Amino acid sequence: MAYVVKENCLKCKYTDCVAVCPVDCFHEGEDFLVIDPEICIDCGVCVDECPAKAIEPESEENVDWLEINAKYSKIWPVITQKQPHRADAHLFDGMPNKLKKFGIQ
Ligand code: SF4
Ligand code: F3S
């Protein structure tokens, strides 16, 4: 089991989540973060930190997102500190079909 970053992180990328993770398992892309499912210890503390409500426990409903998290955590660098988010992040919070519109970067 692991926790999974889902679509609503795309282009919001608030990074509050990384500040609380005890095992530094977040990895950073240009517009999105992922959790390395092999490192995540299922503590759940990142869930309430995310202003975009983009983090969930792994389940049958988010297998596609688990695969995306697993794939990009092998490619992207680790991020351990909160960073300033883009000024227009709030405009992307709740926007439908972000994966289709922007892809994973
Ligand atoms: Fe890190 Fe815990 Fe969130 Fe997993 S559930 S990503 S270990 S803070
Ligand atoms: Fe993304 Fe939420 Fe973290 S928007 S970067 S999962 S705080």
Image (cartoon, rainbow, N blue to C red):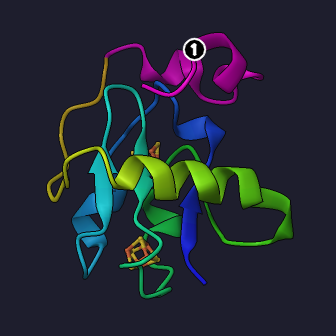
- Ligand 1 occupies quarter: bottom left
Please say whether residue 85 is visible from this viewpoint. Answer: yes
Please say whether residue 54 is visible from this viewpoint. Answer: no
Q: Amino acid at mark 1?
A: Phe
75 and 24: which is toward the camera:
75
Instruction: Say if 93 sits above or below 47 in the image.
Output: above
Instruction: Say if 36 sits above or below 89 in the image.
Output: below
Label 1 neighbour load within 10 Å: few <14, some 14-19, many 20+: few
Within the magenta stretch, is there residue 103?
Answer: yes
Q: Is residue 76 left or right of residue 102?
A: left
Q: Position of residue 96 (x, y in %)?
A: 77, 23
- Which quadrant of the figure has residue 100? top right
Q: Which residues are magenta?
A: 87-105
| Residue under the image location 28 percent in, 71 percent down | 20
Residue occupied by mark 1: 102
Q: Is residue 64 left or right of residue 92?
A: right
The quarter in which the C terminus is drawn is top left
Q: Secondary structure at mark 1?
A: helix
